[in-house]
Image (cartoon, rainbow, N blue to C red):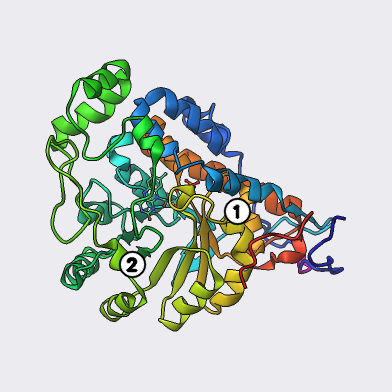
Amino acid sequence: MAVPMQSPTPMAATPVEPAVAAAPAAPPAATVAPRALRRFLCLDDFEPAARARLPRPLFGYVSGATESNASLRGNRAAFEEIAFLPRMLVNVARREQSVELFGTRYAAPFGIAPMGISSLTAYRGDLAQARAAAAARVPMVLSSSSLIRMEEVLQQAPGTWFQAYLGRDPQATARLVERVKAAGAPVLVVTIDSAVVPNRENNVRNRFKTPLHPDLRLLWDGLTHPRWAVGTFLRTLLAHGMPHFENVGAERGAPLVARDVTRDFSGREHLDWEALKDIRRRWSGPLVLKGLLHPEDAKLARNFGVDGVIVSNHGGRQLDGAVSPLRVLRQVAEAAGPMVVMADSGFRRGTDVLKALALGARAVLVGRPMNYAAAVGGEAGVAHALALLRAEIHADMGLLGINRLDELGPRHLYFPQVPRGDQR
Ligand SMILES: Cc1cc2nc3c(=O)[nH]c(=O)nc-3n(C[C@H](O)[C@H](O)[C@H](O)COP(=O)(O)O)c2cc1C
């Protein structure tokens, strides 16, 4: 039988004072976007356009996950398992979706997740994402596997967060942390779900690897995808030279296209809570762990003085079968205490964001759709994608009967079945 998790309390939503200076409803984003982008009405619309634009290995790398894609499917299915219990006859004329994270007020409760080699799928893709996010006043997390120097990104998009993959060498970690500090990133995100390289069969099937190997296949991919070959790849080579992995450590990493170079992923398996102590000591700003799912790990993070966690299964790209963040969010949020809880993996709609917030997240990150939006529309494409999501949240808040995000709670949700994944 269908059991609501918590019965809705009468008058659950805070009654609102008469709307004195009622904010006008945001215009639907699709009507104010540049003409070329108006056909993109929701985040999912960017995917088929990116598929057509990008060579198969690249699109496969972005869209793919790992092994049998169980987590990838679960990430979307989890949202369908929870329904809303909206409240009616609430004056919702003063809706406001700004949110505070680590002392900064952002315009919306979502940001852009870190994605490696975004500047290969879009011309200067890291900058396109970071600049659009800064203009929209939402956070963007620059990946350590990015191809544009963090100093340049932070100069053009102040406030961008930085994500690190850390390895075995404490000296190398120390130098990277110093560089991130000097570059002015306000928040350091350490990804902790990538101890070993996962079995990404799809990369093999799609012939994707980094560094890319200059061979006839690569040439063929370019010839058959001229908009990408000319507009992204050649344009990058001509204007900026061969891209390198610029932010893996304190020094420049491997080039993007090379015959004999391999990228070194070894060492990540040595990262543990002990190593985290050292990072905490060196980085006094907000420290966020990305990629935990277990409430016990949230408790540990709290004890180690971490400021925030991103509940994530890496968009289904690491351990296949890892639980979807939405299913454990409530337990993790309970364990997290005062830490800021965020989530990612599968967020595509305003309603998805509101469900996570009702379960205890303060904000969420969106990955692939932002990559696709940059691939098809550059900075304007990302700006449009962000505006679409923001407009959805604005409308959904009204339909749900809330004016502020902190009014949201489990009482706004209906669970047709008790969520799985209680690991306690
Ligand atoms: C192409 C691609 C590259 C990624 N690179 C990184 C990375 O460098 N560091 C990281 O922590 N997560 C990385 N991720 C995971 C994202 O940060 C995020 O967890 C995931 O994409 C969220 O799921 P979604 O794509 O369904 O929104 C990557 C994801 C994609 C799709």
Instruction: Please tell me whether residue 301 is drawn above or below residue 134 in the rendered image.
Output: below
Instruction: Please tell me whether residue 49 is drawn above or below residue 332 in the rendered image.
Output: above
Magenta span includes 214: no
Q: Which residue is at 69% across, 47% downward?
A: 80
State which mark lies toward you, 2 or 1: 1
Q: Position of residue 264 (x, y in %)?
A: 20, 52
Residue 25 appears anywhere in the view = no
> Nearest the camera: 287 or 91?
287
Callout 2–callout 1 Cβ contact below 8 Å = no
Q: Position of residue 1 (x, y in %)?
A: 87, 55
Name the image quarter holding residue 174: bottom left
Reading the image, the residue beneath label 2 is 186
Q: Position of residue 418 (x, y in %)?
A: 75, 60
User: Most prominent secondary structure in the magenta stretch?
Assistant: loop
**Tag of residue 353:** 1
Q: Which residue is at 54% across, 38% downward?
A: 43
Q: Quadrant of the C terminus?
A: bottom right
Amino acid on which disc 1 is placed: Val
Q: Which residue is at 66% across, 49% downward?
A: 79
> Mark 2 falls on what kind of element?
loop
In magenta, the rendered stretch is 14-18
Q: Which badge, 2 or 1, comes first in the chain's sequence?
A: 2
3D distance between C-alphas at marks 2 and 1: 24 Å
- In the image, is the residue at mark 1 within 8 Å of ligand 1 by its beta carbon? no
Q: Position of residue 46 (x, y in %)?
A: 49, 32
- In the image, is the residue at mark 2 within 8 Å of ligand 1 by its beta carbon? no
Name the image quarter holding residue 268: bottom left
In the rendered structure, the answer to whether residue 127 lies left or right of residue 385 reads left
> Nearest the camera: 109 or 359?
359
